Amino acid sequence: MVLGLILSGCTKQDSKQSAAPASASNQIDVLRIGTTMEFKSDSRNDYNTGIISYGLVNLGLVTRDENGNYQPQLVTSWKSDDARLWKFEMRDDVYWHDGVKVTPEDVKFSIEYLKEQTPQGASQLHLVESVNVTGDNTFEIQLSEPNSRLIDSFISVIPKHVFEKVDKYAEYMGDDALLGNGPYRITKHDIQNGIVEMEAVDTCFMGTPNVKKIVFTTYKTPDTMYMALQNGDIDMIYNYSRGIDTSIIDTFKADKNITLKVVKNTGIPAAIYLNVKAEPVSRPEVREAIRAAIDYDQMVKLFGSEYATAPAAGVLPEGSIGYKDLGKLSRDLDKAKKLLEGIGCADSDGDGIYELDGKKLEVEITANSDKEQLLRVAEIVKSNLEEAGIGVVINSVDAASFSSIADKDHTHVALIAGATPAGMNTSAGAGTAYFDSRYYGWSMLEDDEFHSLVDSMLAATSQEEYIKLVGQVQEYYKKNIPIVPLYNDVFVLAYSSKLDNFTYDYSRGLLNAYTPYTLTKAQ
C-alpha cells in the first residue's frame, strides 16, 4: 500500500474489468463452494452473508489488489488535501438489481443510517461529521478529525429506496433485504439447509461474469467439507480470512485432483488479547509473565503449517505495512515465575498455582465455541500458563455472546481470537483497532501514549511519516503487551485442479469481484 493512494486515487484501466468474454467452451456453469461459515439470518445484517456478498452481490467504493493497493470500484476518484474534507466521484453506470441507479444519495444514506443502526457503523464512521451530495456523481465527506485512512472505514453501500422505510436494519428480512449492485444477485438464501445461491446478471458495468452461477454449501465440520472436495462435490473451499487446516495439507498435496495455493497472511491466526483494565492482567508484570510462559514452538507444531513461525515480538507479522523486526517471541518459564514472584506471588498451598493478594492468581480466558481450533489453542494456553503458576478458567461461549463480551461490554479478562488481514488494517492500521478502547477495544488501551500514536497515524499525510509511526506502535506493543500473538503462518487455499486462473484479493482471498471474470476451466 502506498499512502498517497489513501489521500487520492483515480480510475485505472483494469484488465480484469475490461477483459473480453471467455469462449463458450471455457465458461463455467456453476462454481460450487464449500464452507463452514453459517448463514444464520435472512437479514442483510447477517455477518457471513455479508462476507460472501461483498464484491459479488454488493460492490464497495474501492477494492484492493493482491498487494493491498487500492483500486476503484463504485468510485472513480477520491482526494483530500487535509485528510478531513474528502471529495469523491462515482461511476454513473451502476444499478441496483431492481433497475434503480446507484447514486451519491445511496452513499450519504448508508453512512448516516448504518452509523445509527449498527455497532460496526458507529465505530468505523464515528469521525464523520457530514456527508454532502455535490452533484449527480459527486459527494463530499467532512470529518471531525484528520483520517488519512478514511477509505478503509467504509462499510457496504445499501439501497436508500429500500432502507429509508426500514426502522430496524438488523431485523428486516423482506424480499429486497439482500438487494445488491454487483455482478451477482442472490436467488436462494436457505439458512435451514445452509445453502446460498447467486446468479450472474448482465447489467453490471464490469460485464457478464464467466461463471454463471455460484452455490455455497455450509458443512457442519471441516472433515466433511474436505471429503466433499476430494469427492468432487465442491470446486473450492472458502472460509473468510482462513486457509485449510494444517492436518489436511499433506493429504491434499498427494491428491492430483486438488490444487493448493500458498499466500501470505498479514493477520494473526491466534492470540491472547489482554484487557489491560481487568485484574490481574492490568498488572504489566502479569502480562509479561503470560507472554514469557507460552510455548511458541509447541503452538507452531500443533497448529501451524510447515510455513509457520514463532510470532513477532512487535505483533505485526512479517510482510505487514511498516513491519519492524523486533525479534521473535520465545518461551522463558524461569522469567515468568520470577516476574510473578517479584510482585509478591507465592504458592503457599503447594498446588502449583500462585496466590496474589490473598487469592489464587487466575485468568479467565473467553473463547468462541464456534471456533473449534481456537478452543484447542485455549487448552494449550491453559496448560502453558499453569506450568508458570497462573491458573486459567476457559469461558467458552457462542458467537453472539463472544461478540457481546468482546465488542460491546468488554467484561472479559482475556480473549482467545485471531485477527484478519482486513481487521489488522482497520482504523489506523497495524492492529490498532483491536486494542483501542475507542474502536473494538479488545485490549481496552486508552492511555495517552497509545491514543496519541493512533491519532498521529490517522493524520499522517506521507508514507514516510506513517511507516515511522507504525514502527513506534510496534515498539509500544512489545513494551506494553496488550496482546500475545501465538504463532504466525500463511494461508493455504484449496480448489479443484479442473479450474484455473483464480484472482487473489488482499482481504477477500480467492472469492472476490474479479475471480468470476478470470476463472476458467483448466487446460
Image (cartoon, rainbow, N blue to C red):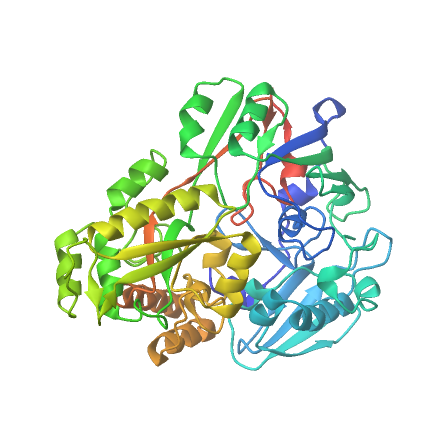
Residue 291's place in the image compared with 191, above or below, is: below
Q: Nearer the viewer, residue 144 or 92?
A: 144
Q: Nearer the viewer, residue 346 or 49?
A: 346
Q: Nearer the viewer, residue 220 or 32?
A: 220
Residue 448 in the figure: left or right of residue 131: left
Q: Determine the image quadrant of residue 85.
A: bottom right
Tell me what residue is drawn at x 33 percent, y 40 percent.
308
Residue 504 in the figure: left or right of residue 428: right
Count of numbered tags: 0
Residue 458 in the figure: left or right of residue 414: right
Residue 10's place in the image compared with 58, above or below, is: below
Q: Determine the image quadrant of residue 413.
A: bottom left
Residue 441 in the figure: left or right of residue 119: left
Q: Specify the farthest residue to the front.
A: 349
Residue 329 appears anywhere in the view: no
Q: Specify the farthest residue to the right.
A: 99
Residue 349 appears anywhere in the view: yes
Tell me what residue is drawn at x 46 percent, y 75 percent.
459
Tell me what residue is drawn at x 50 percent, y 17 percent.
256
Residue 507 at x, y = what percent? 53, 50
Residue 190 at x, y = what percent? 74, 41
Residue 422 at x, y = what percent? 51, 55
Q: Nearer the viewer, residue 197 or 383?
A: 383
Residue 31 at x, y = what percent? 68, 31
Q: Quadrant of the C terminus?
A: top right
